[in-house]
Image (cartoon, rainbow, N blue to C red):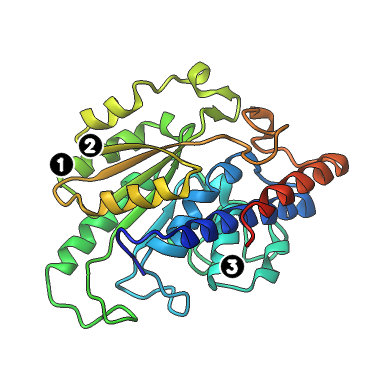
């Protein structure tokens, strides 16, 4: 259920704790399967915690509820963090997490719609904004008419579409085609969150394909723009609230994050984009993440 401007300290601490749990789950999943992406999953943990455990209007008991908010996880390679969020939110049992990337698992190496809670497949990156445009436009047309569906609490506010992007992903031209389309149709029910960690598969984004001035680019495409610290849960929550108040155009939240967040020897290092840890690296990373978790426990 979406809440607005209601962010007590207890909630903030709970969401930080959940984000750290996502990182621990991701480490276990990638280590167990000896395959997967750590860096980009660690960088989006607070974003996913804020969305799934406070902001999104969703019902895990009805993944196809027509009036749900849609979360499109466009940076699909980082899906281990998304799976952790979905499991702890109740879409499937957390015991499924260790089936990650295994034969016949619900949890593929990139998101697939056979997994409860997944809205779109995200194998080739770059399509989230364009697909989000179609969904947002369709929902706007639908919500202009009386609906027989209501939220579990009886709320009836229109559904919104949220797209989580990676900064390496926005090298793709289809992202900017979608951005133009969203502005043309003034899709106020579309919010993009850019996990702007500055590091992609082959190096720093500033070297591979510079994006700056990133805020000015989105503004030039006609979007409402906010820049925040993406590991500060309170800033994420407040930015999501502000984005919901923008009704005449799409909104983007540029969340400045750290690839590999939470494990000192992984941070800012593109070599951890898709590399599983050795046994020694796994043990060191787990100890560091568990130490980080303790600060958020009551």
Mark 3: give few (<14), some (14-19) or many (20+) Cα within 10 Å.
Answer: many
Residue 65 point in image, percent of width and height: 36, 76
Dot 2: element? helix
Could you tell me if residue 268 is visible in this image? yes
Estimate the spatial distance between the alpha carbons at disc 2 and disc 3, rounded to whole Å.
34 Å
Dot 3: element? helix
Mark 1: give few (<14), some (14-19) or many (20+) Cα within 10 Å.
Answer: few
Is there a contact, CB below 8 Å, between mark 2 and mark 1?
yes
Residue 231 point in image, percent of width and height: 51, 43
| Quadrant showing the N terminus | bottom left
- In the picture of the structure, the residue carrying the numbered disc 1 is 184
Residue 112 point in image, percent of width and height: 53, 59
Dot in front, 2 or 3? 3
- In the picture of the structure, the residue carrying the numbered disc 3 is 87
- Quarter-wise, where is residue 180 in the image? top left
Estimate the spatial distance between the alpha carbons at disc 2 and disc 1, rounded to whole Å.
6 Å
At x 13%, y 77%, the residue is 146
Extreme-top residue of the structure: 207
Mark 2: give few (<14), some (14-19) or many (20+) Cα within 10 Å.
Answer: many
Numbered tag placed on residue 180 in the rendering: 2
Estimate the spatial distance between the alpha carbons at disc 3 and disc 1, rounded to whole Å.
37 Å
At x 51%, y 19%, the residue is 208
User: Left or right of 289: which side holds 1?
Assistant: left
Query: Residue 113 or 168: which is nearer the viewer?
Result: 168
């Amino acid at each position: 259920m979406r809440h607005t401007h209601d962010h007590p300290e207890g909630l903030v601490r709970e969401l930080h704790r959940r984000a750290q749990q996502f990182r621990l789950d991701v480490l276990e999943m990638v280590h167990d399967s000896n395959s997967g992406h750590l860096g980009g999953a660690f960088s989006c943990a607070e974003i996913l915690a804020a969305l799934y455990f406070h902001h999104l209007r969703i019902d895990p008991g009805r993944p196809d509820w027509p009036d749900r908010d849609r979360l499109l996880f466009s940076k699909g390679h980082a899906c281990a963090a998304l799976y952790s969020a979905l499991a702890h939110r109740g879409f499937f049992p957390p015991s499924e997490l260790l089936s990650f990337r295994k034969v016949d698992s619900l949890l593929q190496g990139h998101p697939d719609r056979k997994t409860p809670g997944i809205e779109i497949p995200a194998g080739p990156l770059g399509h989230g904004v364009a697909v989000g445009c179609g969904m947002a436009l369709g929902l706007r047309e639908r919500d202009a008419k009386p609906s027989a569906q209501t939220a579990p609490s009886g709320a009836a506010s229109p559904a919104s579409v949220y797209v989580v992007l990676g900064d390496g992903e926005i090298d793709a031209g289809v992202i900017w085609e979608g951005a133009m389309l969203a502005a043309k149709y003034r899709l106020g029910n579309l919010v993009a969150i850019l996990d702007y960690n500055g590091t992609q598969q082959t190096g720093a984004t500033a070297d591979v394909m510079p994006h700056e001035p990133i805020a000015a680019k989105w503004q030039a495409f006609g979007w409402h723009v906010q820049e925040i610290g993406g590991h500060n849960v309170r800033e994420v929550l407040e930015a999501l609230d502000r984005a919901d108040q923008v009704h005449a155009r799409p909104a983007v939240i540029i969340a400045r994050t750290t690839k590999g967040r939470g494990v000192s020897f992984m941070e800012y290092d593109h070599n951890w984009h898709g590399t599983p840890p050795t046994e020694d690296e796994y043990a060191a990373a787990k100890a560091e993440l568990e130490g980080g978790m303790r600060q958020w426990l009551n």
